[in-house]
Structures are given as C-alpha cells and as structure tokens.
C-alpha cells in the first residue's frame, strides 16, 4: 500500500488525452504486472525470475532439419534463384563469379577472328555476285527494242 501512495498518479482526464496514450499504456502494463506478481507470488521464486530461457521454441521444423525454404532452381533454369541460393548457402561467391567470367570469355571467343574475317569476306563476295546482275540491267535505262535518238 505504501508503495502505491508514494507513486505519482495522473488523473484519468489527462491520461485520456491523445499525447498521453503511450504513458497510459505503460501504466496499464505496470499495473497488470503488479497484479500478476501478487497473484503468483507464492509460486514464482527469485531463481525463476533471474534465470534465462533454456529452450528455444521453433514454430517450424525447417531450420531443425536444415531444409531449404522457398524457391529452388536446377540445371540453370533460373540463374537468379541459383545465385541467391549459393549466396545463402555460403558458397564462395568470388570463385563462382570467376568461373562465370571464364565461361563468358570462352563463349565470346568461340570463333577465332581470322575465321570470322574469312567468313565475312565470303559473305560479302556472295552478296556482290548476287546483285552484280542488277547493276548491268540498270546501266540500260531503256528497253533494248526501242531505238535511241542521239
């Protein structure tokens, strides 16, 4: 009782004001805790109050079994998901990036420059042969059976 008299109490009118809502919630929580302590004072020991929790309550068995949660991709079907899974699993990201860079470099140089130059010149030569007949026809703007006046 003496502890209640020593405490400073605010009136109900002040506690109902909008800016005092946090203080009101705090006071209500303290009162609930005091009622709980008084109700179970004979059953709760000091050791129970000071000890830490010895058990971890897990709502799912996924972390217990080391299961993968979420989306999964296999065989390069979704490289973004595979990259995220590698990062989460702790695979060396730098090593994976080096391997990808090596693959990209190999893909970029599948055809040597000299072979590509030969292929391109042959394509150009073929296209020139294909359209060379058009140039000859365009040199004679009038049909051949019409006489030209000079």
Image (cartoon, rainbow, N blue to C red):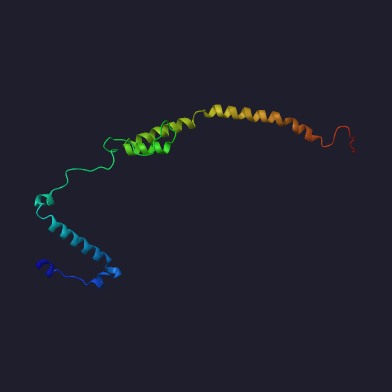
Where does the N terminus fall, quadrant-wise? Answer: bottom left
Front residue (pair 128, 104):
104
Residue 105 picture location, percent across and down: 45, 32
Residue 89 picture location, percent across and down: 32, 36
Left/right of residue 130 with respect to residue 140 in the rendered view: left
Q: In the rendered image, which quarter is residue 18 located in?
A: bottom left
Residue 15 picture location, percent across and down: 25, 69
Q: Residue at x 25, y 73 (%)?
A: 13
Front residue (pair 20, 16):
16
Q: Residue at x 29, y 70 (%)?
A: 17
Front residue (pair 82, 140):
82
Q: In the rendered image, which quarter is residue 134 located in?
A: top right
Left/right of residue 140 with respect to residue 121 in the rendered view: right
47 above or below 78? Answer: below
Left/right of residue 70 with respect to residue 138 in the rendered view: left
Where does the C terminus fall, quadrant-wise? Answer: top right
Q: Residue at x 71, y 31 (%)?
A: 131
């Amino acid at each position: 009782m003496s502890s209640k008299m020593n405490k400073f109490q605010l009136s109900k009118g002040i506690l109902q004001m909008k800016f005092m809502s946090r203080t009101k919630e705090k006071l209500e929580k303290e009162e609930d805790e005091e009622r709980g302590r008084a109700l179970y004072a004979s059953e709760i020991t000091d050791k129970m109050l000071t000890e830490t929790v010895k058990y971890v309550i897990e709502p799912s068995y996924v972390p217990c079994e080391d299961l993968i949660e979420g989306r999964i991709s296999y065989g390069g079907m979704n490289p973004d998901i595979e990259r995220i899974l590698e990062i989460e699993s702790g695979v060396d990201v730098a090593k994976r990036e080096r391997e990808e860079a090596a693959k990209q470099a190999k893909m970029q140089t599948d055809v040597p420059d000299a072979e590509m130059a030969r292929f391109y010149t042959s394509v150009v030569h073929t296209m020139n042969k294909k359209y060379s007949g058009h140039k000859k026809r365009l040199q004679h703007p009038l049909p051949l059976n019409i006489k030209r006046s000079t």
